[in-house]
Image (cartoon, grey):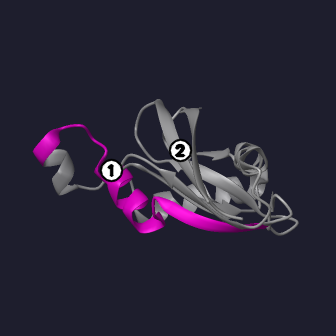
Amino acid sequence: MVTSERIRVQTGGNCEIVDITDQVSRAVKKSGLRAGTVTVFVSGSTAGVTTVEYEPGLIADLQTAFERLFPQGLDYQHNSRWGDGNGHSHVRASLLGSSMMVPFAEGRPMLGTWQQVVLIDFDNRPRTREVILQIMGE
């Protein structure tokens, strides 16, 4: 069986990292499926999803790492073409990825003790993000 769910997440942009683990867990439980996988996909080309230990130190470390690897102030071709100043956002999101799969059993995601599902919004402005959850299992 396959079921889909959509969640909306308000972000401030600028590499904001939002814990969406509870929403993913609720959607898995609501599906009524006992075991399978949930695909977590963010629509849009300036955000990504991953898992992290969601704590202030690591959040700051990730934000610093993205800025070091793909600084906002570089001369991105995308900025020249579109003038929206978010070339760094597209590069960051492309390399992180827009989707991931999480297995679940007994109606719960099989995440590690210190592992949370997060949305990272790299855009240079606040956004309302849509995250699509496709839940497959039995």
Q: Earlier in the sequence, mark 1 or mark 2?
A: 1
Please state the horizontal and vertical placement of residue 78, each as a whole percent of the image: 19, 51
Residue 100 colored magenta?
A: yes
Q: Which residues are magenta?
A: 81-104
Q: Amino acid at mark 2?
A: Val
Please state the horizontal and vertical placement of residue 22, each as a whole percent of the image: 77, 45
Q: Amino acid at mark 1?
A: Gly
Side (left or right) of 125 relative to 103 = left
From the viewer's perspective, is the residue at label 1 or at label 2 nearer?
2
Please state the horizontal and vertical placement of residue 91, each as a whole percent of the image: 34, 60
Task: Judge by depth and name the residue closer to the eye, 24 or 89.
Answer: 24
Say which mark, if any, is on residue 73: 1
Please state the horizontal and vertical placement of residue 77, each as a whole percent of the image: 16, 55
Whole-number angstrom distance, CA of label 1 to CA of label 2 = 28 Å
- Looking at the image, which residue is at 49% across and 39% down? 130
Q: Secondary structure at mark 1?
A: loop
Task: Judge by depth and name the residue closer to the eye, 50 or 28.
Answer: 28
Q: Secondary structure at mark 2?
A: strand
Side (left or right) of 108 relative to 135 = right
Place residue 63 in its image quadrant: bottom right
- Looking at the image, which residue is at 15% across and 41% down? 82
Residue 115 colored magenta?
A: no
Q: Is residue 110 above or below residue 20?
A: below
Badge 1: how crowded within 10 Å, few (<14), some, or many (20+)?
few
- Looking at the image, which residue is at 88% across and 66% down? 113
